[in-house]
Amino acid sequence: MHPRPPATIDGLRLAPCDPLILAVRTDLRPLRGLTGHVDWHLGGVLSRLVAAGKLAHDEPILRPAHPLLPVGRLVLWRQGAATPADLARMVHGLNAGRPGLCPADFQFSESELRAALGPHTIIYVPPTAAD
């Protein structure tokens, strides 16, 4: 397995996770980062949720696995609404052994997420920073 897969659909294929935790901007600008890649791959499903105001609160939304994504469940969290400790509590509550996320999308450092979520977390990195 690639130690730091890129934050792309190919990166998800290289290192599947469960859940995939995505930071979603609610300012109606185009989604970026791994969230933007996933949204594009799913035909704008996440953008439509944002436009409908479904992600305008601070609580995460758990969605089932999607057949077009090589990952398990999806967790959508409004960008800025969660701390690394919040993410860790959610992962623990889901009994998830292999969560994945892109720290840059949440505006966290890789080290603070590894400290909170543990060594089995898959850290997806922007393609220019991937190993």
Image (spheres, rainbow, N blue to C red):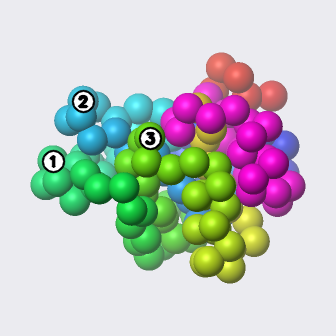
Query: With respect to residue 37, does 56 lie above or below?
Result: below
Left or right relative to 5: residue 26: left
Q: Secondary structure at mark 2?
A: loop
Query: How many labels, in total?
Result: 3
Q: Give how far across and how far down residue 123 sits, in percent.
A: 71, 45
Identify the mark nearer the N-term, 2 or 3.
2
Q: Amino acid at mark 1?
A: Ala
Are the residues tagged 2 and 3 within 8 Å (C-beta)? no
Q: Which residue is mark 3?
A: 80
Q: Give how far across and how far down residue 79 sits, in percent.
A: 42, 42
Q: Give how far across and how far down residue 125 sits, in percent.
A: 67, 34
Please report the bounds of the magenta region as a residue range: 105-126
Q: Secondary structure at mark 3?
A: loop
Q: Give how far across and how far down residue 73 sits, in percent.
A: 52, 70
Residue nearest the viewer, comparing 87 with 4: 87
Identified at 82% across, 57% down, the residue is 118
Q: Residues within 10 Å of mark 2 (few under 14, many from 20)?
A: few
Identified at 84% across, 43% down, the residue is 3
Q: Which residue is mark 2?
A: 29
Q: Amino acid at mark 3?
A: Gly
